[in-house]
Image (tube, rainbow, N blue to C red):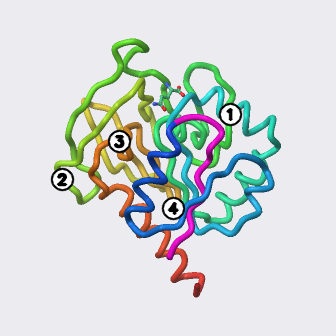
Amino acid sequence: MATIGILAVQGAFREHADVLRSLGSDCFEIRNARDLGRPMDGLVLPGGESTVQGKLITDLGMGDALRSMIRDGLPVFGTCAGMILLAERIDDGHVAHLATMPIAVRRNAYGRQLGSFSATGSFGPLDGVPLEFIRAPVIESVGDGVHVLTEHGGHTVAARYGNQLVTSFHPELTGDTRVHRYFLDMVSGRRTAAGN
Ligand code: GLN
């Protein structure tokens, strides 16, 4: 069984745990630097408010450890604010947070107030995936080695770079578990490669 650590300083972390547990994973919440010492096979960075999460990560002394775990290949899934945390560049002048993924993102790309809506689209080979956007960012440009998984309305809204997976939308809120399954396949791929 895979063990997934979920960043739980702010935002929609419980919903991810519910989905991942329903798929047979073991989950624990990461609330401080000590929690990062617990063994994990994968990491989830949930939606919420990236400025708040980024500040808490720094204030709680978690930034360097998270960055090196991700750079060492720990599979990570960032949704919405979590995607912003992983981006190397943020358009509105905000300093990048973990900056492990060569993408540039634009925050609140659909507007702040009326920016929440539902759609359906493909995600890599999967069709008819519900896309739930809540004050969502979009990916404006991708660097070498980044694979686009979902485009919607002319924007890139899901992508993968090695073991880093990001979505602008919130698969944890839709009842369709296929995106989480895709992430767990990434996790088991790494465990197999590591001989665990
Ligand atoms: N607008 C938020 C931000 O910039 C992200 C919204 C979300 O995670 N649902 O951090």
Which residue is painted at 80% across and 55% down in the image?
34
Residue furthest to the top in view is 113
Which residue is painted at 66% across and 39% down in the image?
9
48 above or below 145? above
102 above or below 155? below
Q: Quadrant of residue 184?
A: bottom left
> How dense is the environment of label 3, judged by Cα within 10 Å: few (below 14), some, or many (20 and up)?
some
Mark 3 or mark 2: which is in front?
Answer: 3
Report the front residue among 181 and 75.
181
The residue under label 1 is 54
Residues under labels 3 and 2: Cα distance? 17 Å
Disc 3 residue type? Leu
Mark 3 or mark 1: which is in front?
Answer: 3
Q: Quadrant of residue 130?
A: top left
Q: Earlier in the sequence, mark 3 or mark 2?
A: 2
Which residue is painted at 56% across and 62% down in the image?
4
**In what element is the residue under mark 3?**
helix
Q: Is mark 3 within 8 Å of ligand 1?
A: no
Residues under labels 4 and 1: Cα distance? 22 Å
Q: Which mark is residue 173?
A: 3
